[in-house]
Image (cartoon, rainbow, N blue to C red):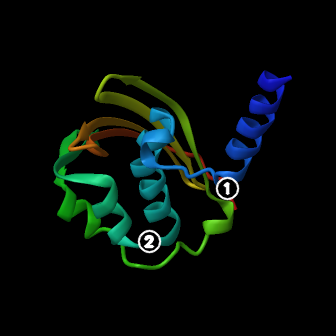
């Protein structure tokens, strides 16, 4: 009977203590998604501050397009965002296709499916000083054939 009373007291105490979530409580995958979500917010809103939040200051953005290597700094890439959502925003879809983590390193695949082009982004991430950041982005742009008018 004494054990049962103690058990009820402990259950009551645990139920009375409010649950507090901290960063340490979050699964690592959710923490690694933070910069990816910031990147997607930049794409949706045109706000370059989301790019600066998502990427490490020394990150590079690279692609091979039209026979040329594109190699941008974070600031050069952020400069391509004008602070406004695109006119066709309602027709754009963005998804995080995959995210794999090994210790403090991760790789993610993001697809930006827009009316005229489909981008496939590959993001390399590192957890630096307890925070996940994109350290490299390479991408492929597939231009969609438009219906003839």
Location of residue 8 (image quadrant): top right
Name the residue at 27% across, 38% down.
127
Viewer-nearest residue: 115 or 130:
130
Q: Secondary structure at mark 1?
A: loop
State whether residue 62 is above or below residue 56.
above
Name the residue located 30 percent from the left edge and 68 percent from the top edge. Answer: 80
Where the N terminus falls, by quadrant?
Answer: top right
Residue 31 shows in the view: yes
> What x and y, as percent, mark residue 42?
43, 64
Quadrant assignment for the C terminus? bottom right
Relative to 80, is 118 above or below?
above
* Residue, disc 2: 46
- Identified at 50% across, 40% down, the residue is 25
Q: Nearer the viewer, mark 2 or mark 1?
A: 2
Mark positioned earlier in the residue sequence (2 or 1): 2
Q: Residue furthest right?
A: 1
How packed mark 2 is, by other alpha carbons closer than 10 Å (few <14, some 14-19, many 20 or more), is some
Rate crowding at label 1 as few (under 14), some (14 to 19) or many (20 or more) other CA atoms within 10 Å.
Answer: few
Mark 1, residue position: 148
x and y percentages locating residue 70 in the rendered image: 20, 47
User: Relative to 61, is 6 above or below?
Assistant: above
At mark 2, the secondary structure is loop
């Amino acid at each position: 009977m004494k054990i049962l009373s103690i058990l009820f007291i402990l259950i009551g105490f645990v139920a009375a203590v409010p649950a507090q979530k901290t960063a340490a409580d979050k699964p690592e995958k959710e923490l690694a998604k933070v910069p990816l979500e910031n990147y997607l917010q930049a794409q949706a809103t045109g706000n370059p501050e989301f790019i600066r939040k998502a990427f490490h200051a020394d990150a590079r953005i690279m692609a091979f397009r039209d026979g040329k290597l594109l190699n941008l700094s974070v600031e050069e890439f952020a400069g391509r965002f004008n602070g406004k959502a695109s006119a066709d925003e309602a027709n754009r879809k963005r998804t995080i296709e995959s995210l794999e983590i090994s210790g403090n390193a991760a790789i993610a695949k993001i697809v930006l499916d827009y009316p005229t082009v489909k981008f496939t982004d590959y993001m390399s991430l590192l957890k630096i000083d307890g925070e996940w950041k994109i350290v490299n982005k390479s991408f492929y742009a597939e231009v969609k054939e438009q219906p003839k008018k």
